[in-house]
């Protein structure tokens, strides 16, 4: 049972020009609506900004973010692509387009965009984590482990990074390493039922049934209904 999370960068900035313009007013209104979670209104504001100036890369980037939040992934991809067409160095547009491609299961294109991000900035740790998730989805677990490890080298206190790498180790039948990473994830975020549940399964694969049952009961305590079924099957006295 693998439950990965992809993060989304949401940038709130507007490139300021020497004089205030109607377009900047629309962009500011859009960003305020986006901050409040009113993405439909934000998109309307960004539409007006684009009418004022169809060559502003920020306007397409912000509108792409709002569409991403509304799960209009293809629309978001179109906007990020327009943004990149206007500014080929717009690193966050590549990153968010990579996430949008991930959501529609176009992992090849997601990998291309995320790799571009790393080529532009080798310290962009989220891109390594997301590349790891892409390779995981392609069942290339060794590559997933490699990129997740690079992400953890840059951000060693990322609980989801350890959890995702543990899942990759698990799928590669490397259960001891999986247990080690689940344990690190738990030490950083001790109230995630998934962490205990998945570590329990790794323990069972190592024939460490006592530890596995302890983790299952902890997962139940944290509200994991699926764990209850496993407790009844594997931990009945």
Image (tube, rainbow, N blue to C red):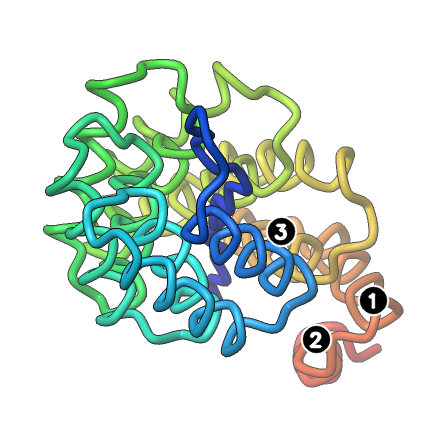
Mark before the other along the chain sequence, 3 or 1: 3
Instruction: Point out residue 214 in the picture as x, y percentages from the top left corner.
Output: 81, 57
Q: Which residue is mark 1?
A: 217
Q: Which residue is mark 3?
A: 199
CB within 8 Å, label 2 to label 1: yes
Residue at 78% x, 34% y is 187
Q: Is residue 161 above or below residue 207?
A: above
Q: Is residue 190 above or below residue 204?
A: above
27 and 214: which is toward the camera: 27
Mark before the other along the chain sequence, 2 or 3: 3
The local crowd at label 2, few if under 14, some if 14 to 19, many if 20 or more residues have their Cα within 10 Å, is many
Residue 95 image-quadrant placement: top left
State the separation of the CA atoms marked 2 and 1: 7 Å
Q: Is residue 3 left or right of residue 224?
A: left
Q: Give the SS element for disc 2.
A: helix
The local crowd at label 1, few if under 14, some if 14 to 19, many if 20 or more residues have their Cα within 10 Å, is many
Residue 84, numbered label? none
51 and 102: which is toward the camera: 51
Residue at 68% x, 37% y is 183
The local crowd at label 3, few if under 14, some if 14 to 19, many if 20 or more residues have their Cα within 10 Å, is many
Q: Is residue 36 left or right of residue 105?
A: right
Residue 227, numbered label? 2
129 and 215: which is toward the camera: 129
Quadrant showing the C terminus = bottom right
């Amino acid at each position: 049972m693998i439950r990965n999370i992809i993060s989304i960068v949401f940038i709130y900035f507007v490139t300021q020009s020497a004089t205030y313009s109607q377009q900047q007013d629309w962009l500011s209104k859009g960003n305020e609506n986006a901050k409040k979670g009113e993405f439909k209104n934000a998109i309307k504001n960004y539409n007006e900004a684009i009418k004022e100036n169809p060559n502003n890369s920020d306007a397409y980037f912000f509108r792409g973010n709002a569409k991403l939040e509304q799960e209009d992934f293809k629309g978001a991809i179109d906007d990020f692509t327009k943004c990149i067409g206007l500014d080929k160095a717009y690193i966050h547009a590549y990153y968010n387009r990579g996430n949008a491609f991930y959501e529609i299961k176009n992992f090849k294109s997601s990998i291309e965009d995320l790799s571009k991000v790393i080529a532009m900035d080798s310290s962009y740790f989220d891109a390594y984590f997301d590349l790891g998730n892409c390779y995981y989805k392609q069942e290339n677990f060794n590559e997933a482990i490699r990129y997740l490890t690079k992400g953890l080298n840059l951000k060693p206190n990322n609980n989801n990074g350890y959890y995702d790498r543990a899942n990759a180790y698990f799928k590669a039948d490397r259960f001891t390493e999986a247990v080690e990473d689940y344990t690190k994830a738990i030490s950083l975020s001790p109230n995630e039922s998934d962490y205990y549940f998945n570590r329990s399964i790794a323990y069972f694969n190592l024939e460490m049934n006592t530890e596995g049952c302890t983790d299952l009961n902890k997962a139940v305590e944290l509200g994991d209904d699926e764990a209850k079924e496993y407790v009844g099957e594997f931990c009945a006295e």
